[in-house]
Amino acid sequence: CTSNTCQPDEGCIFSPLPACNTIQTQLSNDIKQAGNMFDIKAIKNVEISGFQIHCDLEGENVSVHIFMKKGTWVTFDKTSSAWGEAIMVAPEVQCAGGGAVTRLPDLPSRVPVKSGETVAFYVTAESKDLIYSRGTKVGDVYSDDGNLQIL
């Protein structure tokens, strides 16, 4: 089961296993930037297998990199060394455009996250055309599917 199980009208981010669930977010357009950092907290043991983005460049290709680190992104947003090597590089992702989900290739290796653990992700593109919402106050739950929370 991979992130490719999401439907085009869903604002999915990633698919935890083994239940093969997707956790959804909104396809809103509060912010347009070259990247977004966010935390997830596992409620149960999960494996992250993929991501989807909201990209404004309909029909155009963009290069996307995904980084991760154990713990929160807070105070590490300006410390590139804290993130290490990219866990995925997709050099040519064709954007579906505003209001549509753009599927990224599956991660080369699933990311296991143990129950109670927080992991930060940084999804970045070569241009300021990733669209996302302001979410909630840092640390508050934005979305929860019973397996994991997006903070």
Image (tube, rainbow, N blue to C red):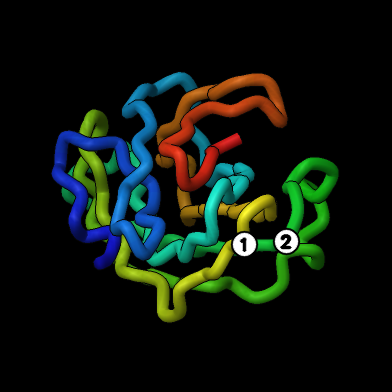
Residue type (three-letter) at the residue carrying disc 1: Lys
Residue 23 drawn above or below residue 84: above
Residue 31 drawn above or below residue 46: above
Q: Residue beneath label 2, please?
A: 70
Q: Residues within 10 Å of mark 1 (few under 14, many from 20)?
A: some
Residue at the image point whose x is 52% and y is 37% from the top:
33
Give the number of the mark in front: 1 or 2.
Answer: 1
Residue type (three-letter) at the residue carrying disc 2: Lys
Give the CA separation, mark 1 to mark 2.
11 Å
Residue at the image point whose x is 78% and y is 41% from the top:
74
Q: Is any atom of residue 61 visible in this view?
A: no
In percent of width and height, residue 39 lies at: 63, 44
Residue at the image point whose x is 71% and y is 31% from the top:
139
Q: Residue beneath label 1, please?
A: 114
Residue 128 drawn above or below residue 48: above
Q: Is residue 121 left or right of residue 101?
A: right
Quick one: label 1 or label 2, which is nearer the N terminus? 2
Displayed quadrant of residue 115: bottom right
In percent of width and height, residue 109 lies at: 45, 79
Between 140 and 106, which is closer to the camera in this rendering?
A: 140
In percent of width and height, residue 88 lies at: 47, 72
Mark 2: secondary structure: strand
